[in-house]
Image (cartoon, rainbow, N blue to C red):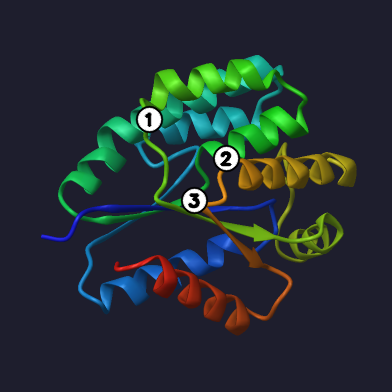
């Protein structure tokens, strides 16, 4: 049995990461892999309830971070870790990098507290590969406006998303072996070629 592999998809809202997860799941299944497609916050009944609170209820940054990590703990314990143990490839739409980017850089919350929560909750678990869909916030905003009404995060101003993008850049700089940067301004076909090239280089899958 091949070992389980854990891939996270990261980027600001509107970067297009979510639309490529199902494509990659099919790509991997064609190669004989069992695949779990999931998301954060979310992925379990409890975590999805917490997601609704985080996306739609006013709260301060600490409450927000605690709810996100509570959802992550349940997600890891009941979905991600069992899937990896049985040899699946886990494709997760956001993971902890999003917390450091949104709550840390975007909200200005204490990165040291986030790092402590990361240690407690994840116990060393990080994705094997993180695909960061990098896109200018103005372009992402135009894409979002064309397809849906904004939630509590998506309604933030451009300066917020500039900070979030910078937060992702810091995370990528701190862990370059894990991150692969995807030019999300490219056409969908070109983005898929970037993903395929990255997986070929980081395999086997």
Residue that badge 2 annotates:
97
Q: Quadrant of residue 143 in the image?
A: bottom right
Q: Residue furthest left?
A: 1
In this rendering, position of residue 167 left or right of residue 21 = right
Nearest to N terminus: mark 3 or mark 2: 2
Residue occupying image coordinates x 64% and y 53%: 11
In this rendering, position of residue 87 left or right of residue 98 = left
Q: Position of residue 152 (x, y in %)?
A: 72, 36
Secondary structure type for disc 1: loop
Task: Estimate the spatial distance between the alpha carbons at disc 3 and disc 1, rounded to whole Å.
Answer: 14 Å
Q: Is residue 2 above or below residue 115?
A: below
Q: Position of residue 17 (x, y in %)?
A: 58, 61
Q: Residue furthest bottom?
A: 189
Residue that badge 1 annotates:
124
Q: Which mark is residue 154?
A: none
Nearest to N terminus: mark 1 or mark 2: 2
Nearest to N terminus: mark 3 or mark 1: 1
Label 2 crowding class (10 Å Cα cut-off): few <14, some 14-19, many 20+?
many
Task: Estimate the spatial distance between the alpha carbons at disc 1 and disc 2, rounded to whole Å.
Answer: 14 Å
Mark 1 or 2: in front is 1
Q: Are marks 3 and 2 in contact (CB under 8 Å)?
A: no
């Amino acid at each position: 049995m091949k070992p389980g592999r854990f891939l996270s998809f990261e980027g600001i809202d509107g970067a297009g990461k979510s639309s490529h997860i199902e494509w990659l799941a099919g790509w991997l299944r064609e190669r004989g892999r069992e695949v779990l497609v999931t998301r954060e916050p979310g992925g379990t009944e409890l975590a999805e309830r917490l997601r609704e609170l985080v996306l739609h209820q006013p709260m301060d940054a600490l409450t927000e971070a605690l709810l996100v990590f509570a959802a992550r703990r349940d997600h890891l314990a009941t979905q991600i870790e069992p899937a990896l143990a049985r040899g699946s490839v886990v494709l997760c739409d956001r993971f902890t990098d999003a917390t450091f980017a949104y709550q840390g850089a975007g909200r200005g919350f204490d990165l040291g507290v986030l790092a402590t929560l990361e240690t407690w909750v994840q116990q060393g678990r990080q994705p094997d590969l993180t695909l960061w869909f990098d896109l200018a916030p103005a372009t992402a905003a135009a894409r979002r406006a064309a397809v849906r009404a904004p939630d509590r995060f998506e309604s933030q101003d451009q300066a917020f998303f500039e900070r979030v993008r910078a937060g992702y850049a810091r995370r990528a700089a701190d862990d370059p072996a894990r991150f692969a940067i995807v030019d999300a301004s490219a056409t969908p076909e070109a983005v898929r070629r970037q993903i395929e090239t990255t997986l070929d280089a980081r395999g086997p899958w």
